[in-house]
Amino acid sequence: MARSYSNDLRLRVAAAAEQGRSIRSVSDIFGVSPSSVSKWSQRYRATGSADAKQMGGHRRAILTDQREWLHARLSEPDCDITVRGLLAELAERGIVVSYGALWNFMRREGFSHKKNRVRKRAGSP
């Protein structure tokens, strides 16, 4: 994701536009787009600041509503289910999520994937 321009540049551009220069001439002087000059000067007139708005934010986890069901399912004594199997069971319940979302949820909740010694998955030939 691109970074925003510095507040110093934004203030100098807004000040130049306030002095009566045309938007195109200010954009040529400072090397920014005319639309940036227009937006920054409008924001400066409206709020007294040309600071950038916040980028990004926090997104609520999709599986928080299914937390209790997932804990019960993964805490069963004979639970030997894969992440793909859990995805299929969630899809049957009407919840469609990505592999990464489920994996991140399991990691946050403290569930880890451990190899099963009985199967000898990583054993030598």
Image (cartoon, rainbow, N blue to C red):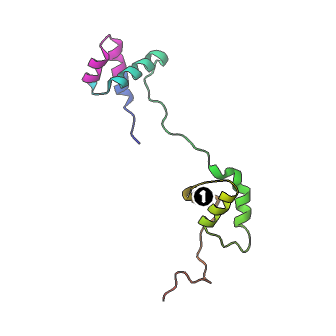
Residue at position x 41%, y 42% in the image: 1
Give the amino acid at mark 1: Leu
Q: Position of residue 64 (x, y in %)?
A: 67, 51
Q: Residue furthest top?
A: 20
Dominant SS of magenta comes to helix
- Of residues 81 and 123, the one drawn nearer to the viewer in this rendering: 81
Q: Residue furthest bottom?
A: 125
Specify start and end residues of the magenta stretch as a single range. 13-29
| Location of mark 1 (residue) | 102
Q: Is residue 16 magenta?
A: yes
Q: Would residue 31 be found to the left or right of residue 103 on screen? A: left
Q: Position of residue 92 (x, y in %)?
A: 68, 59
Q: Position of residue 25 (x, y in %)?
A: 26, 18
Q: Would residue 38 be found to the left or right of residue 62 on screen? A: left
| Vertical order, 93 against 52 (above or below) | below
Q: How many marks?
A: 1
Mark 1 burial class by Cα count in 10 Å: few <14, some 14-19, many 20+: some
Residue at position x 35%, y 17% in the image: 15
Q: Would residue 90 be found to the left or right of residue 103 on screen? A: right
As helix, strand or loop, the secondary structure at mark 1 comes to: helix
Q: Is residue 76 magenta?
A: no
Residue at position x 33%, y 11% in the image: 19
Q: Quadrant of residue 7?
A: top left
Q: Position of residue 76 (x, y in %)?
A: 74, 69
Q: Would residue 1 be found to the left or right of residue 91 on screen? A: left
Q: Quadrant of residue 24?
A: top left
- Of residues 88 and 72, the one drawn nearer to the viewer in this rendering: 88
Residue at position x 60%, y 54% in the image: 97
Q: Quadrant of residue 81?
A: bottom right
